[in-house]
Amino acid sequence: MPKTTRLLLVLAGLLYLSAFTRDRVESWINATVLPPVLAETSVEMRDRNGSLLRAFPVGDGIWRMRPGPIDPTFADMLIRYEDKRFWSHAGVDPLAMVRAAAQTLWNGRTVSGGSTLTMQVARLIEDGSTGQWSGKVRQIRVALALEQRLNKQQILNLYLTHAPYGGNLEGIRAGTRAWFGKGPNRLTPAQAALLVALPQSPEARRPDRNGKTARDARDRVLRRMHRYGTLSEPELHSALTEAIPLQMRPFPRLAPHLTERVRRQQSGTQTLDLTLNAQLQARLEPLVAQAATRAGPSVSGALVIADHRSGEVLASVGSAGYQDARQGFVDMTRALRSPGSTLKPLVYGLAFDQGLAHPETLISDSPVMFGRYAPRNFDGVFRGDVRVRDALQMSLNIPVVRLTHELGPARVMAALRKARTDPELTGGRPGLAISLGGVGLSLLDLVQLYAALAAGGQGPVLHHRALSQPGQTERVLSNTSAWQIGDILAGLTPPQGASSKGLAYKTGTSYGHRDAWAIGFDGHHVIGVWLGRADGTPVPGAFGGDLAAPLLFEAFGHLKPEFTPLRPPPPATLMVGAAQLPPPLQRFRPRAAVFQDNASAPRLLFPPENALLETDGAALTIKLRGGVSPFSLLANGSPVTTGQYHREFEIPNPGPGHAALVIVDAQGQSDRVTVRID
C-alpha cells in the first residue's frame, strides 16, 4: 500500500474516532493493554563523586541506561524538532498528521512524519511495526493510553530510555556515553543535534559507518533550530563546523573484579555507589599492567589503596588486565598467598606490648634450634647482636622467630583476627614459621592489617560501599607500639629514584620467589602491592624490594604529590638509647631464662642474703663474681653506683634498716640480696 494511501487511511481513522461519543472513546482507550513500561536497564557502578565506574549491559546485550539529568539544549531541540505540541496534545497531534499527509501528497514522497513523541514511545516499548494500517492504529491507541496513565515527564523519560542510537545503544545516556564519552547533562549544540537526528534512522545515520549521512541529518536539525530562533547565526556556524565522532567509545569498565563481585552480592540493585575514585583507578590500572610486564612473562599484579582514617577503599586493581592472558580474571586482591616477611612488624609490635623488647633492645642473630626447626636468614649470614630496630629494617629471620617463640604463634594468629583479617593455615596449628609467611593471607588482608597499624593499633574496617558503617577492628597493638613500628619502617631507604623518606613500608618475598609484596602507609593512606603469577608458580629472581617497592612508591605518586606526615609519638613512648633502657629491656632474654641458673650471671658474694651488718655508718663493701662488666648496683630501687669494672668496691651506707641490693651486669643479668643494717 502506498504511503500516501496509508496516511489518508490514518486520517480517515481519526475522523471516524472523532465521530464516537466521548464515552465510547474513553472506554476504548481505557481497555488498552499496555506493554511493560519498566524495561530492564543497565546496572551501574558509580565512584565516590558520582562518576561512572562501570555499567553492565542488559540481558540481550543492549546498553540501556536510565536517562538522568539532560542538557536543556538537547531537550529543547528534541521537542521543537520532533513534536512541537508535545506538552499540550493528548498523545496524537492531528495538525501534525494533516501536515504530513499534505506534504506527502504535494511532493509525492514522505517529507516529514506525523508521529508524536508519545506515538514513538508506543512503538519503542512494543517494538512493533507501523508499516501496516493495523500497526499504526495500535500505536495511536497505545499513545492515547499512555497519555492517560502517565504524565508528560514520564513519557519523555520513556523516550529517553528507549530511543535507539545505533548498534546496541538505547537511551540518551548510552548514546552520549558511546559517541561522546560523557553523560547527557552537558552537550554542545552540534552534539545535541546529532542525538536528535540519530533515532529516526539509527543504522543509516551511524557516524562511524555513514559519516556524511550523519552530518547531513545533524545539520538539518541545526538549520531548523536556527530558523526557530533557538540558535544564533554564530552558534549555527560553529555547530556546522564541529566534527562528528568517527567511532564508538567503549563503556568504562574500571575495577572489573570488584564491581563484578559487588553486582553479584547486591543483585537487584540498579545503582551502586562505591568509595573508589574513578580517576585514580584509571591511572593505576595501566601502572600495574606495566609493572607486571616488566617483571616477566605470565606475571600479574594487584594493588589496593585505602584511607586508614575512614576505612574507605579508594582503588582496587585485581590483576594486570581483566581479559589478559596472565589469568587476569583471577582477583589477586583476594587470593590467599604467603605474605613473606610482611608480618614481621606485627610480631615486633606484639613483643613491644608484652615487654619483651624495645626498638633499641639488643637481640641475638645467631644459630638457634627450636626442636627440629632451625631458622636461617634469607642471605644465610649471622650478624650476632643487633638492635631490634635494625633486625626489622634488615628483615632478619632469626630474631623475629625468637620473638615468635616467646610470644607463641597463637598470639600472632589472634592478633591477625583482631585486625579483621582472615588467615588460613594449611597444617591446622600455627607454627613458628608464621612470622616468615607460613600462613595464607590476601592482599586485602594485609592492607587491612597495616591500616590498623597506621591508625594507632586499632582502626576502621576497610569497605568499598559508600555511606556504609564499617565498624572498628579490635585493638591489635597499643598506640605506642604501633607508633614505634611505623617509626622503624619509616627509616627504610626508599627504592632508587623514589622520593625522599616519609613512607613507612615493608617488603616481603614468599618462599620460592612466588610472591613479591610491598605495603606502606603515611599519615593518611595505606597502599598494598602484590606481584607474582596467579597460578602460584615461582618468578625466578623476584624480590619484594626490587619489584613491588618501586610500584608502591609510584602508586603514592599518582595518589598525591607528597606524603602526609606520620603521627607524632604518643606521650608514653620511651625514646632512649639502649644504655638508658631498664635492664630487662637492654637485651632480649626469653622469660624462662630469668628463672634458669645461668653460670655466667653475676653473684653477690658479700654481703650474703639476710646478713646483719653493724657498720656504724661506714661505707658498705660489695664483693661479687661472674657477670660481664661494667656493673650497676641499686639499693632499694635507686642507682647507687654505675660503670663499675671491679668485682670488689664500696658504696655509701644505705642507712639503718632493711636494704634490697641488686647488682646488674652489662648483659642485663642480675642478682639480689636483702640485708639488715644497724
Image (cartoon, rainbow, N blue to C red):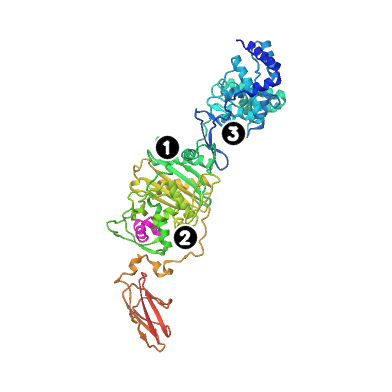
Q: Reply above or below: 18 against 403.
A: above
At a point 39% along the width and 78% down the height, the residue shown is: 661
Kind of residue at disc 1:
Phe
Evaluate whether residue 66 shows in this view. Answer: yes
* 3D distance between C-alphas at marks 3 and 1: 29 Å
- Specify the label residue 80 is tagged with: none
Q: Nearer the viewer, mark 2 or mark 3?
A: 2
- The residue most toward the right is 229
Kind of residue at disc 3:
Gly
- Residue 659 percent across, percent down from the top left: 40, 81
At a point 66% along the width and 18% down the height, the residue shown is: 114
- The residue most toward the bottom is 616
Kind of residue at disc 2:
Ser
Q: Mark 3 or mark 2, which is nearer the start of the sequence? A: 3
The stretch in magenta equals 389-410
Disc 1 designates what residue?
329
- Specify the label residue 183 is tagged with: 3
Q: Reply above or below: 510 against 4.
A: below
The residue nearer to you, when weighing 309 against 142, is 142
- In reply to whether residue 492 is colored magenta, the answer given is no
* 3D distance between C-alphas at marks 2 and 3: 49 Å
- Residue 327 percent across, percent down from the top left: 39, 37
- In reply to whether residue 391 is colored magenta, the answer given is yes
Q: Mark 1 or mark 3, which is nearer the start of the sequence? A: 3
**Secondary structure found at label 3:** loop
The image quarter in which residue 292 lies? top left
Q: Reply above or below: 398 against 161.
A: below
The residue nearer to you, when weighing 269 against 85, is 269
**Secondary structure found at label 1:** loop
The residue nearer to you, when weighing 74 against 260, is 260
**Secondary structure found at label 2:** loop
